[in-house]
Image (spheres, rainbow, N blue to C red):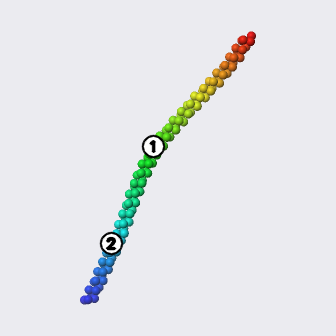
Amino acid sequence: MAQQGATLQNFNNELVKSIEELREKREQISRAILKEEEEKAKISNDLRILTERLSRINESLARKISARNEYDKTIQETEQAYMKILESSQTLLHVLKRETVNLNKQVGQ
């Protein structure tokens, strides 16, 4: 009977030891979970900040692209008007030269 008591005591000791090992592993997992949850929260916050920043940059880019397009349009319209002025100036110069020649012919006669 003493041997059965000793065997039972050994089983009990092993059982207690196994339970302690399981608790220790559970605690390790709990610490790992906590660490990953903290990392997840940090990454989520970083992602929120970056998403807001990306949104602001996209809005800024849209405004700047629109402004650049307006500059392009204004430059093109101004260049076209300037070319018309040059053409008109050239035509005026030709007319002036022709009239000067005609006037000189009339005065010279």
Q: Is residue 92 left or right of residue 8?
A: right
Label 1 SS: helix
Mark seen at residue 74: none
Label 2 SS: helix
> Residue tagged by mark 1?
59
> Residue tagged by mark 2?
23
- Estimate how packed mark 2 is, as few (under 14), some (14 to 19) or many (20 or more) residues with alpha carbons within 10 Å: few
Rendering coords of residue 3 (x, y %) = 28, 88
Q: Is residue 83 left or right of residue 28?
A: right
Q: Is residue 93 left or right of residue 1?
A: right
Rendering coords of residue 9 (x, y %) = 28, 83
Inspect the image, locate mark 1, and give the three-letter code of the amino acid beneath it. Glu
**Mark 1 vs mark 2: which is more N-terminal?**
2
For image coordinates 32% across by 75% down, the residue present is 20
For image coordinates 65% across by 24% down, the residue present is 90
- Estimate how packed mark 1 is, as few (under 14), some (14 to 19) or many (20 or more) residues with alpha carbons within 10 Å: few
Q: Quadrant of residue 99?
A: top right
Task: Tell me the CA gap for discs 1 and 2.
Answer: 53 Å
Inspect the image, locate mark 2, and give the three-letter code of the amino acid beneath it. Arg
